[in-house]
Image (cartoon, rainbow, N blue to C red):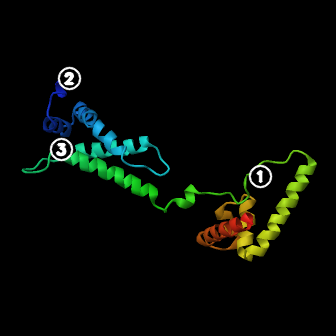
């Protein structure tokens, strides 16, 4: 059956061909219901994403509907099943993006800030930078515990978590917790 003939087929005929392994039938169904996906994806907003991301999620839901649909006596029509699969996939994507679970990754802030990322050019600038770093370390020592201070200084010097664990004789979880606590404390110091 040619591609133009498939456009004249019913959903059920295309589904039967798709389940038999006909990729063109699957493609025809995806094209046929792409407007439904566009319509549903425009209703929602994805935090940190774009409309195209929701459209892609909707198309994944449509593909799953094509793969999973099984007509049973008295069952719903494919269009209804596709509508449910697409809308659930989009809603799940919206819910997942609004969870606070990945917030630390999305709101990452460097301990040192951007001003110390580049090396100073002149000797005067190098002296000023060294003074600022010394001042910052003094503030850190007042705010952080001895263990947190040791971990943060090691971290700032470029040591990996595994190297810090070996140097301190503590577990990776302890070191990671110390870094996270220190970041919160130091953000408060930097705000002042």
Residue where numbered disc 3 is placed: 78
Quarter of the picture containing the N terminus is top left
Task: Estimate the x, y position of residue 116 in percent, counting from the top left.
Answer: 78, 53
Which numbered marker is on residue 174? none
> At numbered mark 1, what does the secondary structure look like: helix, strand or loop?
helix
Residue where numbered disc 2 is placed: 4
Residue 130, compared with residue 164, is above or below; it is above
Residue where numbered disc 1 is placed: 115
Q: Nearer the viewer, residue 126 or 32?
A: 32
Binning the other alpha carbons within 10 Å of mark 3 as few (below 14), some (14 to 19) or many (20 upward) gives some
Task: Estimate the x, y position of residue 60 in percent, counting from the top left.
Answer: 33, 44
132 relative to 166 in the view: left or right = right
> At numbered mark 3, what does the secondary structure look like: helix, strand or loop?
helix
> At numbered mark 2, what does the secondary structure look like: helix, strand or loop?
helix
Which residue reaches farthest right?
Answer: 124
* Mark 2 vs 3, N-terminal side: 2
Quadrant assignment, res 178: bottom right
Q: CA distance from mark 2 to mark 1?
A: 62 Å
- Give the residue at x 68% y 57%: 110
107 relative to 99 in the view: left or right = right
Residue 175, compared with residue 40, is above or below; it is below
Binning the other alpha carbons within 10 Å of mark 2 as few (below 14), some (14 to 19) or many (20 upward) gives few
């Amino acid at each position: 059956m040619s591609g133009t003939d498939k456009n004249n087929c019913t959903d059920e005929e295309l589904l039967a061909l798709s389940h038999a392994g006909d990729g063109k039938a699957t493609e025809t169904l995806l094209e046929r219901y792409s407007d439904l996906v566009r319509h549903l994806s425009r209703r929602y907003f994805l935090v940190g994403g774009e409309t195209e991301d929701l459209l892609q999620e909707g198309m994944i839901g449509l593909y799953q509907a094509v793969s999973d649909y099984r007509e049973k006596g008295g069952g719903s029509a494919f269009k209804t099943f596709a509508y449910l699969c697409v809308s659930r996939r989009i809603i799940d994507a919206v819910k997942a993006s609004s969870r606070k679970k990945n917030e630390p990754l999305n709101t990452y802030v460097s301990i040192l800030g951007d001003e110390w990322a580049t090396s100073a050019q002149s000797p005067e600038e190098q002296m000023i930078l060294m003074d600022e770093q010394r001042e910052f370390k003094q503030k850190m020592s007042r705010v952080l515990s001895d263990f947190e201070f040791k971990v943060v200084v090691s971290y700032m010097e470029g040591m990996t978590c595994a190297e810090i664990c070996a140097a301190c004789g503590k577990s990776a979880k302890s070191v990671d917790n110390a870094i996270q606590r220190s970041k919160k404390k130091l953000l408060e110091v930097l705000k002042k």
